Image (spheres, grey):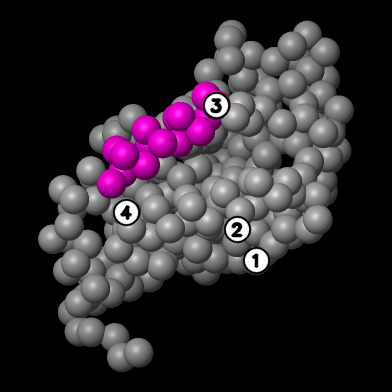
Amino acid sequence: MSAGNPSTFAPCVVIPVYNHEAAIATVVQSVRAHQVPVFLVDDGSNQGCTLELLRLGRLPDVLLIRHAANQGKGAAVCTGMRAALAAGYTHALQVDADGQHTLADVPHFIEAARAAPHAVICGYPIFDASIPKARFYGRYLTHALVWLQTLSFDIKDSMCGFRLYPLAAVATLLQRHRIGSRMDFDTDILVRLYWQNVPLHWLPTQVRYPLDGVSHFRMWQDNARMTGLHVRLLLGMLLRLPLLLARKVRPLNGRGRKDKQRVRP
C-alpha cells in the first residue's frame, strides 16, 4: 500500500490495536467508508483479536503490521506512522481501536489538515455520560501541568487520541527524542511538538467510553508513568524557558515559524 507521490497531500489512518476484537471491525469499516487507507498495528494482541486483524488486513487499502509482543499504545502508533511515512503518506490520523471516537468527523480532520498541512489537527473532546468521573476530573490535573510545561493555554487537551499528525514533523521529533510508549504517549508527543514550534489546530469531537467495554488503563502503573512524564516535561520546560517566553512576544504563524511583527489581539 503506497501513497504514490510523497510531495502531494496524502493522508491515512493509523489504528493501534490491543485486544479489541469486539470493536475493531466496526472501527475499520467506519474509517474505510471515508475512503482513507488504514494502517492497523497489532500490538501483541491475544489469539482472538489477532485472527480478526488478519481478516481485516486482507481488505483493500488496509495494511496490518504486527508487534510480536505488547509494546504499548504509543509504540504502536509510532510504528504505524513510520510505516505510513515510508509508504509515501504525508499525514496520519490516529484513531483508537475501542470505538470511542466519532469517526464521522474523519473528513473534517482531513480537510483541516489539507488547509493547514504543517499543523497537528487535535481533537478537543466533548464527553457524554459514559466517561468515568474520576478520569474526567483527573484530566484537569494533566491540563494544568501541561499549561505550566508550555507556559500557555494553547494545548486545550493533551490526552485525546483522535489527532492528525504531519508525518515530517513527527519523524524529526522521533529522531531527537524518545517518546512515551504507553498511556503517556498522547501528552508527551503533543507537548514536544509544541516545543518544536509545530502549530496546533483544534476541532471539537464527541467521545464515548468505550464501545467494547475494554480499557487498558492500569491505575497504579499508568499513574506512576504519567507522574514521571510530568516531572521530565517540567524539567524540559525549565531548559526551554527563554524560548517559551520569547514565544509570548512573537506568536507562531501557521507554518510553525515566528512572525516578524507582533500580532494584534
Mark 2 or mark 1: whose residue is earlier in sequence: 2
Which residue is label 1 attached to?
A: 204
Q: Nearer the viewer, residue 60 or 149?
A: 149
Q: Which residues are magenta?
A: 220-234
Residue 121 numbered mark, or none = none
Q: Nearer the viewer, residue 182 or 110?
A: 182
Tell me the distance, in whole angstroms, between the alpha carbons under discs 1 and 3. 30 Å
Is disc 3 in contact with disc 2, using a CB cutoff of under 8 Å? no
C-alpha separation, residue under disc 3 versus residue under disc 2: 27 Å
The amino acid marked with disc number 2 is: Gly
SS class, disc 4? helix
Residue 205 vs residue 34, the one in the foreground:
205
Which of the 4 image quarters holds residue 66?
Answer: top right
Which sits earlier in the primary sequence, circle 4 or circle 2?
2
Give the residue number, with chain letter if any, for mark 4: 149
Give the residue type that dot 4 points to: Gln
The residue that label 2 is drawn on is: 123
Q: Position of residue 78 (x, y in %)?
A: 48, 31
